[in-house]
Each structure stands twice: as C-alpha cells, then as structure tokens.
Amino acid sequence: MDKEIDITVVGKVMEVDVTGKLTKKDYEQFVPATDKLIKEHGKVRILFVMHDFHGWSAGALWEDLKFDLKHFTHIERLGIVGESKWEHGMAIFCRPFTTAKMRYFDSAQLDGAREWITQD
C-alpha cells in the first residue's frame, strides 16, 4: 500500500494529510516542521486528516509519545478528521496528552474542520 504524508502550513495552522501507516521516518518530516512553526508563532493549531489510515509503526508510536510530551502546551487546537470509529476513539485517547482543544470530524466534515481549526 502506498503511504504518504503531506504537510501544508498557513500562518500558525498546520494541516497534516496522512495515508497508510505512519513510520518513524514520517516524524523526521513532521517534527521539524512543527518545531519551526512553534518557534515562529508560540502556540499552533494542527489539523490531522487521515485517508485510509492504518495507524503507527512501533517506532512511530515512540516518536509520537516524545512529541506529545515535548509539545504538551504548544498546541492550542487539534482537529482530527477520519473515516472510522477507531480513529474517533484515537481522538479521545489522545486528550490526556495535550492541553489543546480537541475535536474529531468525520471525513465528510473536512470543510467544517478547516473552519473550526482557524476560527478565533
């Protein structure tokens, strides 16, 4: 299966589109982009959009945990857009690892998610 991660940044908002399974190598792209955005804006907003998403490799889970601990207070909003119940459950599971306002959106609500992530 093809795997892809695509990052778009506008102001203090980062949209991360992922397909397939995240690996440690994906975090080598995602983490520096996030660190740069935090350095520029202090607090940032991230919209994580999953298409045919299959989770994380073990190495990616470790990188994700380190990222969550490092940026516990740097993310003010985190939107998760997904296609299945387990992705919604993942959004609930992530809540203790961040102080961000979090919200899950079904893939059909992508426009609404983009609106929510940018509103004041």
Image (tube, grey):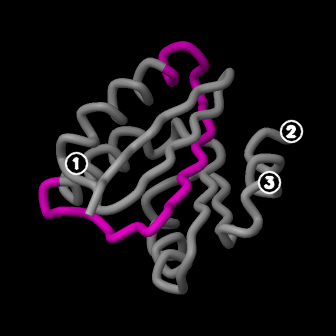
Disc 2: CA contacts within 10 A as few (<14), some (14-19) or many (>=20): few
Range covered by the magenta-colored residues: 37-59
- In the displayed structure image, the side of residue 110 where residue 65 appears, left or right: left
What element does badge 2 sit on? loop
Which callout, 3 or 2, points to the residue nearer the camera? 3
Residue 23 drawn at (x, y percent): 21, 52
Residue 65 drawn at (x, y percent): 28, 54
Q: Which residue shows up at 51% across the image and 22% down it? A: 37
Q: Nearer the viewer, residue 29 or 117?
A: 29
- Earlier in the chain: of badge 3 and badge 1, it is 1
Which callout, 3 or 1, points to the residue nearer the camera? 3
- Residue wearing tag 2: 120
Q: Amino acid at mark 3?
A: Asp
- In the displayed structure image, the side of residue 3 where residue 83 appears, left or right: right
Q: Is residue 57 above or below residue 73?
A: below
- Residue wearing tag 3: 111
- Mark 3–mark 1 distance (CA, rounded to whole Å): 29 Å
What element does badge 1 sit on? helix
* Outermost residue to the front: 1
In the picture, which quadrant includes the N terminus?
bottom left
Quick check: marks 3 and 1 in contact, CB under 8 Å?
A: no
Q: Amino acid at mark 2?
A: Asp
Q: Nearer the viewer, residue 71 or 52?
A: 52
**Circle number at residue 63:** 1
Residue 72 drawn at (x, y percent): 45, 46
